[in-house]
Image (cartoon, rainbow, N blue to C red):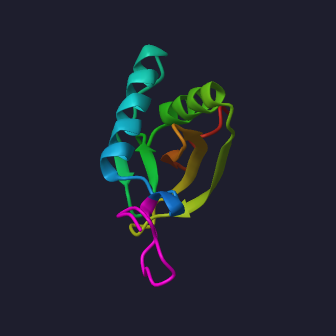
């Protein structure tokens, strides 16, 4: 038996069996995504979160009407749709939570913004 063989008594599975990606890998996917966004002249988010625990990347945009347009551009670029639902913050301020979900580099990505109520429509 070699060092890479497994037996029925092994109690842990290799990371790649579960598809778990390392934090450095996820950070590289995030960096590649931001470089792609810059090259494609996509609006850049105000912050980014990379999570090994959740195995995803989150892009946060500002709380204003321009972010709805930014999310639209991202959705079009990645062939995704914008979804939204009402949200009431802890301070009582009402907004619409808008999000775009897609996959980049084999990783789930969520771009989102909390847009103040009344700023998502053009009327």
Is residue 71 in sight in this rendering? yes
Residue sticking out furthest to the left:
24
Q: Quadrant of residue 106?
A: top right
Q: Position of residue 59 (x, y in %)?
A: 43, 43
Q: Is residue 37 above or below residue 3?
A: above
Is residue 48 in sight in this rendering? no
Q: Is residue 34 above or below residue 110?
A: above
For image coordinates 57% across by 52% down, the residue present is: 96
Q: Position of residue 36 (x, y in %)?
A: 45, 22
Residue range (magenta): 1-15
Residue sticking out furthest to the front:
1
**Residue 8: within the magenta?**
yes
For image coordinates 62% across by 33% down, the residue present is: 75
Query: Which residue is nearer to you in this view: 22 or 62?
Result: 22
For image coordinates 46% across by 71% down, the residue present is: 6
If the image is split into quadrants, where does the N terminus sit?
bottom left
Q: Position of residue 86 (x, y in %)?
A: 61, 59
- 79 relative position to 65: left or right: right
Query: Which residue is nearer to you in this view: 73 or 85?
Result: 73
- 72 relative position to 41: left or right: right
Q: Is residue 46 above or below residue 9?
A: above
Query: Which residue is nearer to you in this view: 29 or 83?
Result: 29
**Looking at the magenta stretch, what is its main secondary structure?**
loop
């Amino acid at each position: 038996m070699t060092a890479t063989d497994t037996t029925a008594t092994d109690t842990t599975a290799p990371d790649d069996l579960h598809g778990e990606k390392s934090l450095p890998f996820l950070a590289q996917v995030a960096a590649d995504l931001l470089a792609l966004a810059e090259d494609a002249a996509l609006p850049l988010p105000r912050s980014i979160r990379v999570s090994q625990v959740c195995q995803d990347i989150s892009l946060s945009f500002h709380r204003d009407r321009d972010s709805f347009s930014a999310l639209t551009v991202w959705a079009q670029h990645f062939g995704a749709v914008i979804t939204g639902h009402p949200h009431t913050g802890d301070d009582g301020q009402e907004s619409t939570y808008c999000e775009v979900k897609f996959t980049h580099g084999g990783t789930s990505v969520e771009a989102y913004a909390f847009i103040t109520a009344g700023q998502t429509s053009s009327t």
